[in-house]
Image (cartoon, rainbow, N blue to C red):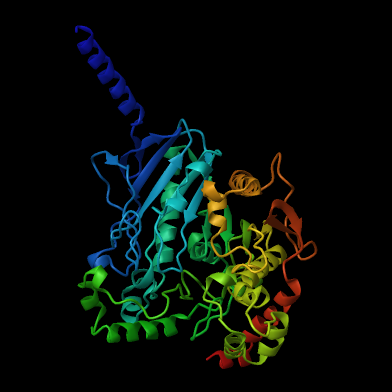
Amino acid sequence: MKKKPILLALFAIFSTSIIVAQQPAAIKIADGLVQGRVEGGLTVYRGIPFALPPVGNLRWRAPQPVKKWDTVLQANKFAPGPVQGWTPPSGKSEDCLYLNVWSPALSAGEKLPVLVWIYGGGFNAGATSDVNYSGEKLAAKGVLFVSIAYRVGQLGFLAHPELSAESPSHTSGNYGLLDMIAGLQWVQKNIAAFGGDPGKVTIFGESAGGIAVSMLCASPLAKGLFRGAISQSGGSFGPPRTTTYPGENLKKLPDAESAGSAYVKNAGYNSIANLRKLDADKLPAIRGLAWPIIDGWVIPDDQYKLYDAGKYNDVAVMIGYNSDEGASFSPPKTPADYTTAVNTRYGKFAADLLKAYPVDSNNVPKTARDLSRDAAFGWHTWSWARLQSKTGRSNVFYYYFDQHPGYPAGSPRYGYGSPHAQEVAYVFKHLDAAQTTKSDLEISDAMATYWTNFAKYGHPNGSGLPAWPAFSDKKPVVMYFNQTPHSGPVPDAKSLEVLDAYFKWRRTPEGEEWAK
């Protein structure tokens, strides 16, 4: 019986040691002390504020510096995601400007490279708490992993004359991009305390996150905040258009302000001041998609023109897309639907594009869906690679993700490739074990290693990996992720040239007038 108190005492000591082990020492950053927790050999910090809550009078304003705190901030859970149409795992709130850090560093002096993740979601959804974006597998490869939040939808991208008038920049509409820039400024100021090197920051994102990466590469406000960029199914090189389409999503500020005025009027309010009094979840959604705009400040101009003139942040980039992106965006159900849609969007170029991206007599095969893929992602990646390799000094690494099952003839998915966002689980090493093949594991480990090598060295290559050559117009080599990593030519290059002729015409006076 005497042994019982001793055992209880030992258990208490052991339990206390576990608790202590899970609570590393608080670290000091610019705004105060932060307490993380140990998870699987990493120190993880969730929910660190990088700006004031953009609520009340700060709604639809550029993010403001966070106020310092006196107590130790317990950074042990994800903050709510931004207000949107669905509910993220951590919930949603207008108070959403927080970031998270996964650090393998044992001391502040290690100066490890930093990967900063920007989530996708069409600029209308997304959150850092998405389980697919958990950074422990990438951090375990010797980098600091950071994920930053930004405002989406009407709270992130509403332009309006009143908002432009009250802004020091005399612009409005790109609040979500400004949030990303504020997050990157926080990284520059604070990441050394976590064992990171502010001189070795690489940004990366997928879909809207990859498009945002492209925009940050072109924004003078982001100059010097990162040395490398990875864009997965991104790029933003289409010309502006009043009636937008995938790949031609951008409006100019006056057009966006006009749309914003209509939004406020249709909501039944006569001023921005009145809309600021409304609860965030009561705000009406923007008809269509909220999207960044060419405001002359965050995004100075048509990005294609900026790159052609060499006016961008010249950093090494790794860019690519998936083989069947078009299958993910409500492709036309019949050949007649497809032909009508192509004629409506592309005008006098429709006939050439229907030849380059042909449709069958009774279905819409991948050859036709590839027009959607290339108009939204493929042409942008190809143009980005070509423009930067011509006008820049930094290397471009180009990839094509085509890792998918060989669907049998007669199955509903026969002839399908890799859909939009499929590669995310491979990069983050979050594959579903029940559906994973040996090839999937090999591709996943190769991609995670290429991605972290890029953060470490400014290029993806390393021991044990197939060589990934830099891209140029003279040597247009692409890394294929299909069963094994291997190099090959630009996918569907001849079709891309036809689409390129359309986009060149769109930038002529005739093409600009037609697009109105």
Q: Position of residue 51 (x, y in %)?
A: 33, 55
Q: Position of residue 178 (x, y in %)?
A: 41, 63
The extreme front residue here reads 410
Q: Position of residue 298 (x, y in %)?
A: 46, 69
**Residue 491 visible in the picture:** yes
In the image, residue 155 sits, relative to residue 262, either above or below, namely above
In the image, residue 215 sits, relative to residue 357, either above or below, namely above
Q: Which quadrant of the figure has residue 94?
A: bottom left
Point 69% across, 42% down: residue: 462
In the image, residue 201 sits, relative to residue 141, either above or below, namely below
Say whether residue 245 is left or right of residue 74: right
Say whether residue 25 is left or right of residue 113: left
Say whether residue 457 is left or right of residue 272: right
In front here: 471 or 343?
343
Point 61% across, 86% down: residue: 342
Q: Which quadrant of the figure has residue 7?
A: top left
**Residue 201 visible in the picture:** no
In the image, residue 219 sits, relative to residue 252, either above or below, namely above
In front here: 187 or 463?
463
Say whether residue 2 is left or right of residue 464: left
Q: Quadrant of the N terminus?
A: top left
Q: Position of residue 202 (x, y in %)?
A: 55, 51
